[in-house]
Structures are given as C-alpha cells and as structure tokens.
Amino acid sequence: MTNIDIITQMRALIQALKKHNHAYYVLDNPVITDGEYDSLRAKLVELESNFPHLKQPDSPIDDVGGEPLPFFTQITHDIPMLSLGNVFDKDDIANFVRRVNDRLDDKSKNPKFEMELKLDGLAVSLKYVNGIFTQAVTRGDGRVGEDITHNVRTIRNLPLVLPDCVDIELLEVRGEVLMPKAGFAKLNQDSHAKGEKTFANPRNAAAGSLRQLNPNIAKARPLAFYGYSVIQGLPNNIDTQSGAMEFLKHQGFDVSPFKVVANLGQIDEFYQATMSGRDELPFEIDGMVVKVNSLALQEDLGFLSREPRWATAYKFPATTATTRLLDVEWQVGRTGQLTPVGKLDPINVGGVTVSNVTLHNFGEIQRLGVMIGDVVSVHRAGDVIPKVSGVMMDLRDDNVREVSLPTTCPVCASPVVLPEGEALARCTGGFICTAQVQEALKHFVSRRAMDIDGLGSQWLVKFFEMGFIKTVADIYRLSDKVDVLQNLEGLGEKSVANILFAIEKSKATTLPRFIFALGIRGVGESTALNLAQHFGKLDDLQKASVEELLKVVDIGQITAQNIHEFFNNTHNMVIVNDLIALGVHWQAVVKDVGNAPLDNQTWVVTGTLSGMGRDEAKAHLQALGAKVSGSVSAKTTALLAGEKAGSKLDKATELGVRVVGEDEFMAMLAKYGR
Ligand code: IVH
C-alpha cells in the first residue's frame, strides 16, 4: 500500500465515523449498529497505529464524542466526564491488569478490582445540594454538556431528596439513564400501532427521551437511573468504589450488581457468569467495567489522555462483525427456488467463524443494495443462522460488481424465471433438475413428512446418484436390491436391514403427512391438514377443481392452482399411484361434517405458549373442528395469543376479533376432554 492509499482509506473512515457520530449523538438516529461502528473505528485505530506519521489532524479517535445540542443550556462540568478504554478478550484484560500493577509501588501491587455491569444507556451527572436534587447534565463532549434537569426529574426511580445528605453541601453522582427492555418493547409497540417513529434500540430511545425540551415526553417514557460513581462529596470514611456503590444504594439509588474480585481468574469468572445471564437482565448491557477498588490507588494511577488508567470496559463479543462479500452462489431448493448464498471472507462473529451466509432471495439483495466485493456487516443472534444486516456503502470501491440473477439454473441449465412482483426466482427444470429432485427426496423422508429416520440424506443422495432411486416411489422398491445394497462400502447387512425396516414402518402414515410429503409448492403442514380435513379422501382432493380448492381455509389462488396442476400431471399421478400400490396407507380421515365443537370456526395462533408448541395447539384446534389460518382477517373467529404476540394481536384488536389467552385456551381444551 502506498502512502496515498493509506491516507485515502483513513479519510474515508474519518468521514464515515463523523457522519455516524452525528447521526448517533445529534440526530439520535443511528444508521449502523454499534458493532459496525466499532469495526470502522477499529480499522482507523489500526491504520493510525501502523502508520502514526500519516495520522490525520481531524481524526475522531481521541474525541469523547457528541456535540451539545444548541437549544439546551450548556453547562461546563466541574470535573470532565471522561470515557473508558475498551478491552475485548482475556489477553487484553490481562494486559490491563499488568499495566495497573506496573505503575503501582510494591506495597500496593495486586490491588482488588471492583466489577460492574456496563450499562447501555446515556451517562449523566447529577448534583444534589444539601440532599436536594438540583441539576442533571449530559456528558456532551465530556467538558460541556446540556442541562436536562427538567427531564431527569421525571425519572421514577431517581431519589429527589437524600435525607442522609443534608450536611453534604454538594454531592455529584454519575450514572446511566437507560430504558429497560420491557419498557422499550412496549414503547415501540405503542408507537408502531400509532404509526409513529420507532427507536432502533433502548439506548437511542433513552437518548431521544432526554433530548426533549418538553419534560412531559420524558415523563411518559419508562426511563431508569443507575448510579455508578460519586464524583464530589463522598463521605471521607469511604475509601473504595464498592463502598461508594453501597453508599449510593443506601441513599436510595438503584445500582447494578457489582462485585469485588482479587485476581484475573475471578475477573473472568464474573465476566463469563454475567455474559451467560445477560438475556435475563431487565436492561441491556454491552460488557463489564473493571475498576481498581481503592479510591486512593485510583488517584495514584490517574488518567492517560481521556481515559482512566484505573478502569476499563471489558466488552462482550460483538454479535455483528464486518467482512468482505467475496462471491454469491445460487442454491436450488426443492420447489426450484434459487437461494443466493454469500461467500464471505471468513470472519469471527461472537465466537463462531462464519464463511457462508444466506441472502434469502433476489429481492433481499436488491433491498440491501449489496454488490460482490462490498464490505458487509454480518449479524448473528443466539443460535440463529447468520445474516447480512447491512452494507458499508462508505467503504465501497471501484472493484465491486453487481449480483446478477442467473438466467439458467446452475444445476440443470433450465431457464430461470422471476415472476413479476415476486422475490423468489425459480428454476423451471422440475423433474429434470437433479437439485430439485434430491431436495424433494430429502423432504419426502423428513421427520414431519414420511418420517423415514433410518434413511439419512447422505445415503438417499448416494442411492439417487447410483440410479437406485429416481422418484420417491423407488424408496419403497429398495427392498428388491438388498444384495447390491449390502455390498456397498459403508453399508452392511445390519444397516441395510435398519434402513429397510424404517422404510417399511413409514408405510403406515396419515393423509396429512402424505399430502405434505408430496412437496406441492405452497402446501406446508398446516395446509396439508386443512386439505385432508376438507376432502377426507385423497381421491376427492385429486379430483378437486381450482374453485373447490379455493373453498379450503387459507388457500389462495396460487396455491389452489399449484395443487390442481400437481394432481393433473401424469408423472406425479404415476408416482402417487405407485406409492399406494407399494403399500403406503393411512387411516380414513373423519371429514369435517359439521358437528365438532369448533366447526365453521377459523382460528389463528400467535406468540409463544408456555405449555405447548404452536403446532400442537393448531392440531388440537383442528381436531376440535376449527380451521387454522396463518393470518388474521375479518373472517377470523378467534386469535389464540401467547406471550410476545406481535402484529397479529394488533390486527385482531383493530378488527375486533376475539383474543383468547393461553389460560382460556387450556380451559377450553379441558372442557372438550383434550
Ligand atoms: S465508569 C471515567 N461505570 O460507559 C469514566 N461507566 O465508555 C468512568 N458506563 O461514559 C465511567 N456503565 O456512559 C462506568 N458501570 C459503569 C458504566 C459506565 C456504563 C458508560 C458510561 C461511560 C461509558 C464509557
């Protein structure tokens, strides 16, 4: 890299960081996540430390961040509000502890540390004069902040009078104003329902609430204050940070859990324990803060530039990371859908290396505006499959190229179509596309379909490649090939017997499972059940016209046409008849005749039920005669709503549809003997 290249990169990063600082601090409307911001910042820090002679004079790296808003009274802090350095792993925290020790004289070495949660809110400084709350100021740029006393006064857990502090002329307490997760979810839900702007995260909601001139807005928001330091006026007999926290607690402040630890092992223990319990906390945290516990030693250690030497933030691994999108490959699914899979420059996201990421469909690529060669941010939440959450447009260079939808299938070369207004492109190859056939075979044997658990997809694909299985019906003809199978490498007498036993067992199935296993486009488990209930017999389903199919609950024009086409395709009918001739059978379904308790009713299930899965609840409803639909409409009889019910609940309330909670539902099941 030439100097010009490095400076160009530095300039691009500086400009991006400034723009995002403004969006975050001034507009309260960040366009990228913290992880994305951190990685932009980390890139600039790295360049600056490798090439210090090229460091740009306006680099934002040393800024504490934030410009005071012009319309609030500006207040100069008596003592500047500084920032914390960050560490991200065991080595970093060990270095921090070592650096602390290096600066201490022999008798003070190996000090105790006090650990706190790093609350994800907004730092504020409060003043109490003779025990009376008088002023609250934001951090601003660290030296000058904004007067937000009128808003902070409305925070419900903030003590406005400290009876034990009347003798303290000036007490200055610093801490974090935050919005607890539950309050944030409710606020966004309400705003969404009213068509108002929602907030990206609880911290921005808290910041947005405090940066209001009208205190009634803050008052209506579920804000909370948690104290973490006493800057002026701490009684002389208190000489530790943990003592200061106890003092705050005693005066009626909320403080987050804290702990005094003696060594690196204990630091790590509390860090790990907090990280694993993080989701259960009522508020968001993004790491821990490790502070030297002795206030005298804190004073000895002092500050380096704008960060204390006696404390650091030990951040949790980011769940978002940035990397380059190297290529996009297209995978062909069971019904021919083409799924773009992003090939990434491998990146560690929260402890897991990610090199492939789904881009869902062509529509998603358009929505993201992503191009091959772009730097993208990859987000991973819990066990969820990683996804591309954004594109770093600031870093786009001339080497990017567009992601183009293939015109022919990458597997069978049949034409690809992207129906007007649809996000999913499809291969039109059908049975000649080996990718589609293999996926259809895998679907047929899967647990919720024919449930042939002994026939794993590896062998299934192998048998397909060897020509033993061409269609799903051939699975039931494998028993004719025992001798050949037994001689295959990796398969012996015993495993062949197991596979054949599982196949034999699967012959006794149910009509809904059988319909689902056929893999008709748009026919999931719930639709298969509705079809079975409606028609009772496979014969009647096969003969049904599009008009008749449209009478089945939850079936629209496209699915009705797909079903009709499927059963009018000779190839499909040969396979269905073969399956039955080979012994696949089911018990007759009692057709919906109109005397079950929930006959003629249409139910929708949403949210999380504590006592059973949603599928189980649907099965109960269907067994009681109800139709189960996926969306709420004016025709819906009732909505069964569990915890965290979202838009369906809103819709039901809006339409005046009856909402049934889990308790009522359980009582209803009991009443009908289920
Ligand atoms: S102590 C000299 N303790 O983190 C700075 N800060 O990155 C002393 N924060 O501006 C700060 N929880 O907004 C401290 N338990 C905690 C904290 C905490 C969150 C925030 C605070 C600060 C930022 C520094």
Image (cartoon, helix red, strand yellow):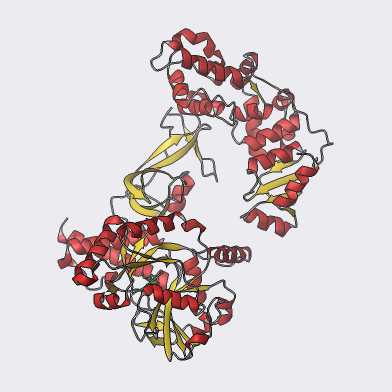
In this rendering, is residue 340 above or below 634?
above
| Residue 37, position as x, y percentages in the image | 36, 62
The image shows residue 204, relative to residue 489, as above or below, that is below
Q: Could you tell me which residue is drawn at 59 percent across and 75 percent down?
A: 220
Task: Look at the image and tell me whether residue 274 can be seen.
Answer: yes
Left or right: 174 with respect to 112? right
Q: Nearer the viewer, residue 385 or 362?
A: 385
Q: Quadrant of the N terminus?
A: bottom left
Q: What residue is at 55 percent from the left and 82 percent from the top? A: 214
Drawn side of residue 205 relative to residue 82, left or right: right
In x, y percent, where is residue 249?
A: 48, 75
Residue 593 point in image, percent of width and height: 82, 33
Compare residues 293 and 189 and report the one nearer the observer.
293
Location of the C terminus by quadrant is top right
Q: How many marks?
A: 0
Position in image of residue 112 (x %, y %): 31, 67
Where ligand 1 lies, by image quadrant?
bottom left
In the image, 99 versus 473, the foreground residue is 99
Say if 576 sits above or below 206 in the image.
above
Quadrant location of residue 107?
Answer: bottom left
Residue 633 in view (yes/no):
no
Q: Is residue 468 left or right of residue 566?
A: left
